[in-house]
Image: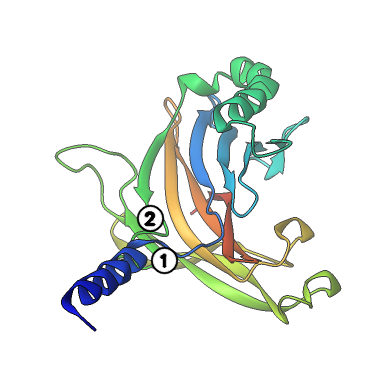
Amino acid sequence: MNTALRRLALAATLLTSALPAFAGDIASVRPIGFSADGSVFAFEEFGVQSGVNIPYSNIYAIDLNNNTFLPDTPVRQRGDDDKATLSAIRKQAADQVAKIVQDRGLLDHPGELVAFSPVSEVSSDPHSLTYRLRSSVPNSGEPNTLTLEELDEGAPAACKEQVQTIKGFRLRMTQISGQKQDKVVYEDGHVPASRRCPTGYRLGGVVTYQIPGGAVVQIALVLVMNPASDGSDGRWLAVPIKP
């Protein structure tokens, strides 16, 4: 091979190695806020579905007292084709929950994203987060550590063409205000069908909110992984933490 061809081959190799492999889509997550009394939390997940290039936006408003959705939620908007824009789809979803957001004062109480670990983060444990309840400098309060444990469950019939085992999860506090603990704060009794065929989870973040004159509300953001034709899709759960 002459010098010119070698250079061309090397350039092609470098260009190919720089291109990302196709993969399933991981939804972005955006906390919307809390009600003043800390009894309601809302968040949005959104993105562009891999392979078909169709945008989507899902908004969830959760009654934290009984861990159920508020009436008329979740709101799910999805483009009809790849000509739809993500901004338009997100606006449609936001318009549908505008009354809930206004009536509950959610934008007045955004809370704080005190910990966040996206799938692109390579230096952190995907199943553990250590955080303080508030953002301040100098630091205020002692750290908490939240861990996630995956639980095996036999796959339902709808999943068996993809996987033989699906995953549930358990959340455990191993440190509270700097003190060693071993307290389960959430555990799946049975993986709900709404999660489809989960193959794993990532402990993606923690959102907190200080109730005026009251306690600090904590929400774990858990990323649910599902098989996709070109990798794994990721969608979000918000789980109240009650230490």
Q: Please state which amino acid type lies under the numbered disc 2.
A: Ser
Q: Is residue 144 above or below residue 34?
A: below
Front residue of this view, candidates 174 and 109 = 109
- Which type of secondary structure does the marked residue at label 1 adopt? loop
Which residue is at the far right? 157
Q: According to the image, label 1 marks what residue?
A: 126
**Type of the residue with mark 1:** Pro
Judge from the rendering whether residue 159 lies leftward or rightward of residue 243; answer left or right. Answer: right
> Quarter of the image holding residue 195?
bottom right
Q: Earlier in the sequence, mark 2 or mark 1?
A: 2
Q: Quadrant of the N terminus?
A: bottom left
Place of residue 207 in the rendered image (x, y in percent of width and height, measured from the top left): 44, 42
Compared to residue 79, the image places residue 156 above or below, namely below
Query: Dot 2 lies on which element?
Result: loop
Q: Which mark is residue 117?
A: 2
| Residue 176 in sight | no
Tag of residue 169: none
| Residue closest to the eye, 23 or 96 | 23
Which of the 4 quarters of the picture holds residue 5?
Answer: bottom left
Which image quadrant is residue 99 in? top right
Residue 111 in picture, x, y percent from top left:
42, 32
Residue 211 position, x and y percent, is 45, 30
Q: Are marks 2 and 1 in contact (CB under 8 Å)?
A: yes
Number of other residues with Cα within 10 Å of mark 1, as a class: few under 14, some 14 to 19, many 20 or more: some
Q: Position of residue 159 (x, y in %)?
A: 78, 72
Is residue 20 found left or right of 225 in the rendered image? left
